[in-house]
Amino acid sequence: MAVRSWLFVPGDSEKKLGKVAAAGADVVIVDLEDSVTYDNKQRAREMACDWLKAHRQQVTDRKFGRWVRINALDSRMWRDDLLAVLPGAPDGIMLPKSAGPESVQALGAELYELEQRCGVQANSTRILPLVSETAAAAITIPSYLTMPLPRLAGLTWGAEDLSAAIGAARKRDAGGKWTDAFRFARTQTLLTAHARGLIAIDTLHADFADDKGLKRAAEESRADGFAGMLAIHPAQVPIINAAFTPSEEELAEARAIVAAFSGNPAAGALQIDRRMIDRPHLKLAQRLLGIEE
């Protein structure tokens, strides 16, 4: 299943929930956290569960993933969130402000109990933590590498909460590149996810009206090794999907590389179109084509 675009939708907006299935996102994240006021939390939980149930049948067709972002574990709301939405059997839970792998373990233990209670298949609910939203969390991202976390689907990061946590007046420099603290968090997220063999999902592009900037950010994200990107508006979805979809030229080149090594299995390096390719090129080509090594 593709994981290029991860679109947030407020859990308390009947209008937006009604439209989001047609947005073309690979994954829809019903948000119970930042986009929902405290007074609307319970209403959002109920609407989220109704939406999950209404779209549960499409799981067999794999049209899009159905996820929920709950409130943070240091709030008093996250257990109520889980109790409300687990009957809808979401594919996964996005965990905001994850303090480290222990947070994922705590959430996993709670999910195990609720899956049994709600008649959901055991261990089927995955977890995607936001791993950089405090300074302490950002400097401990590599700790996700070694702890057993069977529900962990991947890692993603966020710049907005981190900037507030460290009092940063800017996140990007004059050239549009991430400044050091944010580049550090992004790099750690990417490398740790790949080291575990999991998906790495890049943070959102906050200016949803900036199509040109989003296109550049999404193309750079894919080129850097991310599998997908968060989105905050349906208009961002086609731009992200296009950026993370290999072109016909890329696919043709990847097939040529795989074919060349298939015909010369003992070769360490080969020449294609007057350029040298070696085993790392083969590995990239296989990844692009979805070929198991």
Image (tube, helix red, strand yellow):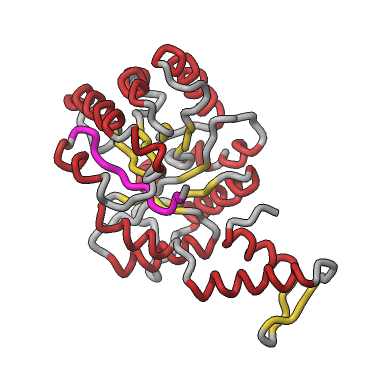
Q: Which image quarter holds the C terminus? A: bottom right
Q: Is residue 95 visible?
A: no
Would you say 35 lies left or right of 275 here? left
Give x and y (percent) for residue 208: 26, 57
Would you say residue 10 sits in the magenta stretch? Answer: yes
Would you say residue 107 sits in the magenta stretch? Answer: no
Residue 291 in which image quadrant: bottom right
Give x and y (percent) for residue 154: 52, 42
Q: Is residue 214 above or below residue 48?
A: below
Looking at the image, the residue that sits furthest to the right is 266
Give x and y (percent) for residue 94: 41, 35
Residue 286 in which image quadrant: bottom right
Q: Residue at x 64, y 39 (%)?
A: 145
Q: How many marks?
A: 0
Q: Residue at x 30, y 44 (%)?
A: 8
Q: Is residue 90 above or below residue 249?
A: above
Residue closest to the eye, 1 or 278: 1
Q: Residue at x 38, y 49 (%)?
A: 26
Would you say 211 lies left or right of 154 here? left
Residue closest to the eye, 156 or 132: 156
Q: Which residues are magenta?
A: 2-12
Looking at the image, the residue that sits furthest to the top is 117
Would you say 52 lies left or right of 267 here? left
